[in-house]
Image: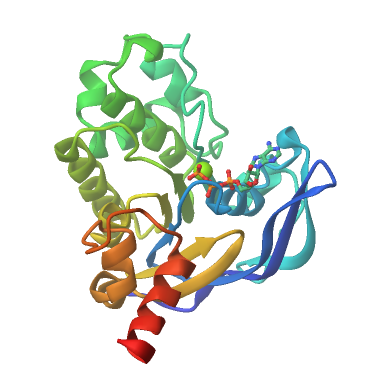
Amino acid sequence: MSGPALLTVEKLEVVYHRTITAVQGISLSVRKGQIVAILGTNGAGKSTTLRAISGFLGIDDARVTDGSITFNDKRIENRQPNEITRLGIALVPEREKVFPNLTVVENLAAPFAPSRYNRRDSENLAYQFFPRLAELRSRTAGLLSGGERQMLALASALVCRPELLLVDELSLGLAPVVVQDLMARLVQIRHELGTTIVIVEQSAAVALSIADYGYVLENGRVVLDGEGARLRAHGDIQEFYLGQSSGSKRRSYRSVKQYRRSRRWYG
Ligand SMILES: Nc1ncnc2c1ncn2[C@@H]1O[C@H](COP(=O)(O)OP(=O)(O)OP(=O)(O)O)[C@@H](O)[C@H]1O
Ligand SMILES: [Mg+2]
């Protein structure tokens, strides 16, 4: 299912406005054909990590200040986003995923797409995975439902024919059945196009339903990583992220760990 390393992030450090260190020494590895999940609560550094990989840091006045990002044996940290897209990485961003004033079909034509594919090819690729978009092709994107908008965002990234697809928070605010359908599409995209996928999610249950491997971030650091199935079964993940806790209050991952340790020692 998975081959050699496609993406390697080593000891990555990202700083906003020259002062705020959002990512502090993250290392992760994504092999060809894998679906990898990046999990963590608000402010953990998930989106920043995806922005750094895709090059979309400048608009937020951020920079990679240490460490490296290697994609297909090329160093890509601090390169321009269009250059990184051309190398085969596409980002479905956290915010402003579609152009709200353009129609569905105009959105599909808007991204940088390799010139050997024409507009028709791009549309066909989008409708292969999201047939609903064909029915909505003349609709203004701003009027789409939440789920339809996410479909369009994914489709707009797909028409760039990425080797690596980065997806930030697809599930937020959507009904579980819609989320399930979107996750199934990601699996289908991987299966039919061989695309390697990194998904960022606050919901561990959603991400780990399809991920081969996962990383849990907290305060800009990796605090836990492992095979998807192992993380699903991991007591700390169940307790903290899957809401199967015996405790009442949501605590940090670290404090859950300390709590479990203390129970082991004293309980
Ligand atoms: N544009 C920005 N300017 C300054 N600081 C920022 C900016 N974007 C993010 N940060 C800070 O960087 C840290 C990591 O944020 P990031 O958005 O990467 O977290 P996240 O894990 O994606 O969180 P969420 O689940 O809420 O989306 C936070 O402390 C955040 O306040
Ligand atoms: Mg985020």
Question: Which percent across, then down, holds residue 152?
Answer: 36, 28
- Residue at left 41%, top 42%? 169
Q: Is residue 266 above or below residue 99?
A: below
Residue 11 in the figure: left or right of residue 109? right
Q: Is residue 215 visible?
A: no
- Residue at left 46%, top 24%? 98
Residue 146 in the figure: left or right of residue 29? left
Determine the residue located farthest toward the left in the rendered image.
177
Q: Is residue 187 above or below residue 145?
A: below
The image quadrant of residue 105 is: top left
Q: Is residue 249 visible?
A: yes
Question: Which percent across, then down, holds residue 59?
Answer: 72, 33
Question: Which percent across, then down, holds residue 251?
Answer: 41, 58
- Residue at left 48%, top 23%? 109
The chosen color scheme is rainbow
Determine the residue located farthest toward the front in the rendered image.
266
The image quadrant of residue 262 is: bottom left
Q: How many badges with numbers are in the image?
A: 0
Residue 220 in the figure: left or right of residue 92? right
In depth, the one of 174 and 160 nearer the eye is 174
| Ligand 1: quadrant of the figure | top right
Determine the residue located farthest toward the right in the rendered image.
18
In depth, the one of 11 and 235 nearer the eye is 235
Of the 4 image quadrants, the one containing the C terminus is: bottom left
